[in-house]
Image: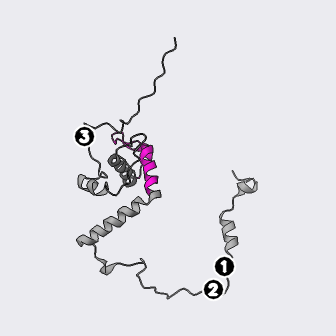
Amino acid sequence: MKPSRTRPCSRKAPSHTVFSIIRKPYRSDVSDVQWDYLSALLPKGARTGRPRATEREILNGILYVLKTGCQWEDLPHDIAASSKTCHRRLLEYQRRGVWQKIVRVLLQEADRRGYLNFTNAYHDASVIKSKKGPRRKSATRANTTFAASNATFSSRHMGIRSTLP
C-alpha cells in the first residue's frame, strides 16, 4: 500500500479565520482610524468564489514592502497575507487607479481641514534664477538617430568577439 501524499502546510492561515493572536504592529501598519477611512476607498471583492484574504493585512503587507524596500518574498511571516497575494493586489490597485483615488481623497480631506497651504506651492521645482540666462538653440540639428542606435549598441548582438579577458 502506498503512503498517502499530503500537501505541505501553508505558512499563512486561511483568510476566513479570525485571528486571536495579536501580532506586534509594524511602523508601516495602518491604524484603526486610518483603516476605517481607507476601507471605504478599496474595491470590494467578488461575491462568489474563494473568499479573499483580509484586506487590512494585504494593505499592511503592501505598505511594509513599500516602506522597507524589501523583496516580496521577505514579507514577515506574521502578516496574515502571502507575498504573492500582496503583490497581485498592489498590481490590481495600480491597474484600477485605487492609489490615485486614495491620494485625491486624502488631499481633499487635508484641504478641507485646513492642513494644506497653497500660497507657496510651485508647479515646477526650478525656482532658482539661472545665472547664465536661457539656453540658446544650436544652428545645427542633433542627429538623434545615431545617438539612439549608439546607446543601444551591443557587441554580443552583432556577433563580435572580444579579445580582451
The residue closer to the viewer here, 77 or 35, is 35
**Amino acid type indicated by mark 3:** Ile
| Label 3 CA crowd tier, 10 Å (few <14, some 14–19, many 20+) | few
Residue at 66%, 68% (x, y): give it: 148
The reply to whether dot 2 and dot 1 touch (C-beta < 8 Å) is yes
Secondary structure at badge 2 equals loop
**Amino acid type indicated by mark 2:** Ser
Residue at 69%, 58% (x, y): give it: 154
Quadrant position of residue 149: bottom right
Colouring scheme applied when the structure was drawn: one colour
> In x, y percent, where is residue 135?
54, 85
Measure the C-alpha gap from mark 3 to mark 1.
63 Å
| Label 2 CA crowd tier, 10 Å (few <14, some 14–19, many 20+) | few
Which residue has dot 2 on it?
A: 138
> Magenta stretch: residue 38 in it?
no
Q: Is residue 115 visible?
A: no
Measure the C-alpha gap from mark 3 to mark 2.
66 Å
Measure the C-alpha gap from mark 2 to mark 1.
9 Å
Q: Nearer the viewer, mark 3 or mark 2?
A: 3
Compared with 125, 150 (above or below) is above
The residue closer to the viewer here, 136 or 91, is 91
| Label 1 CA crowd tier, 10 Å (few <14, some 14–19, many 20+) | few
Residue 121 appears left or right of 135: left
The residue closer to the viewer here, 139 or 88, is 88
The disc, 3 or 2, on the residue closer to the chain's N-terminal end is 3
Quadrant position of residue 126: bottom left
For the image shown, how many numbered marks are present on the structure? 3
Which residue has dot 3 on it?
A: 22
Secondary structure at badge 1 equals loop
> In x, y percent, where is residue 113?
23, 70
Segment colored magenta: 69-93
Which residue has dot 1 on it?
A: 142
